[in-house]
Image (cartoon, rainbow, N blue to C red):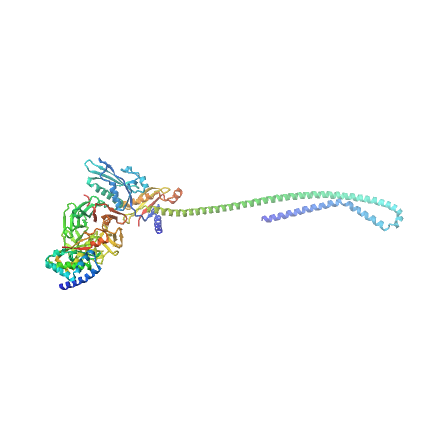
Amino acid sequence: MFSRLTFKSSLLSILLHVAAVLLLVLSFDFTSRQVKPAPQVNAVEAVTVDSAQVEKELQRLKELEDAKEQEKLEKQRLLERQAREAETKRKTEEQRLADLKKKKEQEQKALEAEQKKVAEKKKEQEELERKRKAEAEKQRQDEEAKKKAEAEQKKRKEEEAARQKQVAEQQAAQARADQSLMQGVIANIYQDVRNNFNISGLPPGLECVLLVRTVPGGEVVGVQISKSSGNEIFDRRAHDAVQKASPLPLPADSATFERLGLRQFNLRFKPQ
Amino acid sequence: MLMNTRIFLVVMLAVMLGACSSTGGSKKTTAAVSEGSGSGGNSEVSTYGAGEGAGSGMSELDDPNSPLSTRIVYFEYDSSEIQERYREVVAAHADYLVKNPNVVVSLEGHADERGSREYNLALGERRALAVKRQMTLLGAQASQIRTVSYGEERPIESGHDDNSWSQNRRVELVY
Amino acid sequence: MISRILLFFVLALQATASPAEDALEIVIDRGIENTLPIAVVPFGWSGAAQDPPMDFALTISNNLDRSGRFAVMDTEDLPQRPLQFQEVNFRDWRLLNMENIVLGTLKALPDGNFEVEFRLIDVYRGAQIAGFRIPASPKQLRRTAHRISDIIFERLTGIRGAFDTRIAYVTVREDQGKGRRYYLQIADADGFNSQVLMESGEPLMSPAWSPDARQLAYVSFEGRNSAIFIQDIITGQRTRIAAFSGINSAPAWSPDGSRLAMTLSREGDPEIYVMDLASRSLQRLTNDRGIDTEPAFSPDGRRIAFTSDRGGNPQIYEMNLNGGEIKRLTFVGEYNARPRYSPDGKSMSLLHAQGGAYRIGILDLESTDILLLTSASLDESPSFAPNGSMIIYATSGRRGSELAAVSSDGSVHQRLALQVGAVQEPAWGPFPPEKP
């Protein structure tokens, strides 16, 4: 739609321009003819003189001596008539020229007016075009901006998604790391407590559960028997095992410590 | 039967004596047996007879030249078998008992210190009974022989070595 | 190791998955078998005399140490010497990994008696486990220390202490002018407070405690043959209960004290008999041409183990008292003798010889494995403590025969310092009768 409109207006514009240029060229031709007439007239006169002299050069030279005078008179008169005719012609020509000039001026004026009109129209067209173009440009820009915004939006979304993905991955990695850390920590707690859990001389089959409270760094700040084995010595040995293992191998960094969730946990003593 | 056995044993003793004189035994025993062999196997038996005839048993027991002067029979570890070199001694004492029916001998069995005390007490008895059995086979009356075991409770040697142990594994004949 | 951890993880994860618990649970499925760290602080003393009549802390320390179950801290290493609970600086003791401390005071009373006060303290709980104030006459002081040791032992191991028990044994001395003399003696389980029950120029053997700890059966040769006597420890009254021809020996009490197993050879060779003590009636249990001796009642009184060489060399056999076949128990070693059941009936102490070395071993009745507890070459007469935690035995060496003790797992060995002379055939007495 826009492109067809643009093509039409462009064609129109080109035609107008061609017309204007043609007008200008034609007017230029008139002007140049008007300037050249004098040398054209002289040339005709000279041809005429030359031919009469060539053919009757010597015979007529004496014969025509008198005639020469006559001729001279006649020629004088011819010349005078010719001069009058030329004068008339000149005046007529002048008049014609003046008319022509006037007409030309009128034409010029009209042309100018036309040109002006054309120019104005063109200007108008141009303005329109400009406006249209501006509008189109604006539209394009808007479009572009919109597109850009959309792209940016999309990009942002993607980035956000990526970021979220990354966060998720980081979290997953963290979780994996935590899990691995957790396993290590649990294994170490197990090891430390076990190595302090003296079951020497105790009867088999006993079991107790202790609730252990710790702080970052692993210091045991509380041991509570949540399920007694019923054997005081067994319970006491379990209790002492935890206390002797303190500080337990827990992270000192409180964020990590909290993530592991070992501020409070159960220890089930159940020697096989 | 009894007579036959005695004859057999006398022959046995003669054979043994030959063996002993060539190989030797423990110091104590060899000395006693050498004396006997010097006067011949048969004369040894007759010596008992002479003793009995003399009616002086005790003096014969005190005779250092008589096999009767040997009053200890030694044994191998954890064994109650009478070794060959002591069969003459046992036979001599048996014969003495036969010839002196009123004499009573006490056989005191002993063991070395190794092993458990109660088992050693039984082992000492077994040794004493082995000697007693031999003597009764040779004609001595069971009533003439009293056995007792002291196990390892009365060692002769107090050392903790092979020599002491070999001295302590024994049956003592006590008249 | 790895499999342990894996197993543990499986357990831990299972436990974690349990919806009932919101807290993580770690399962401690194993422990260690270790001696228990304990410190016995020297007791305070208040009395007119400069020094206390005895060192309680030393006696208690020695007892606990000898049991093999405790790691007793050297007195020089004690970080402090508190006399009262309030004076205990728990942090100091914890830094030393000390689990329990004992502290107390000995006070002389105006009437010449004493008052002993002691406390057993759990360092990691900062709490008192036991605390007693015990009056004691001067003669009872040492026994009081043993009773305190028993309380500590029981409260920390769950096993009844056997320090307040006595041992019987025979000593042999060459006395000037008298020749070799045999003494039947009893003493505290730590070897102190010995007293002579019987003296003889003839051998004495095989002391055996009655289950009520009031009587001793033993073998005396005073009649120029072995004979079995029972003697009342307090009154000294004695009864000859077996003096047949042949051997009369190896007395062993039934757990209820009504019967005495013994070895008699009155029928030719040594056989096992059981005598009903009330009626003196005898029942012969074995009939074999070999030596059968050293009977021992199982703790439930239903079986008798004994030594027999019926198989060619001494090995241990077992029979049911109500009939049934005789079963051989030992197959390893050239010589296994003198069985004694552990108090729990699951194992048996014995004398085991291999390659000429006589050592104390423990026969596991289930696996029939023999664990050798000693490494000397002339050990004999093992006897279980009534709580089964230790074995006392006699060992012969350059210094003659002396008493030694070993923990039942073979981990702790100790010589018991007794008086001069050869000491043999120790018999660890039963728990004392319940106090009135």
Residue A56 in picture, x, y percent from top left:
86, 50
Q: Quadrant of residue C281?
A: bottom left
Q: Is residue C84 above or below residue C362?
A: above
Which residue is painted at 61% across and 49% down in the image?
Answer: A7
Q: Which quadrant would residue A226 be assigned to in this image?
A: top left
Instruction: Work out whether residue A18 or residue C144 is closer to the camera in this orientation and state it.
Output: C144
Choose between B125 and B81: the one closer to the eye: B81
On the image, the x and y values in percent for residue C402 come to: 23, 48
The answer to whether residue C389 of the structure is visible from this angle is: no
Q: Position of residue A109 (x, y in %)?
A: 70, 42
Q: Nearer the viewer, residue C255 or A27?
A: C255
Foreground residue, C435 or B92? B92
Q: Residue at x 60, y 48 (%)?
A: A5
Extreme residue toward the front, this view = B38
Question: Residue at the spot x=64%, y=43% of the render?
Answer: A120
Whether residue B168 is situated above or below residue C127 in the rendered picture? below
Left or right, C32 with respect to C140, comes to right
Left/right placement of residue C397 relative to residue B61 reads right
**Badge count:** 0
Is residue C352 visible to the viewer in this orientation of the structure? yes
Residue A13, image x and y in percent?
A: 64, 47
Q: Is residue A228 left or right of residue C214?
A: right
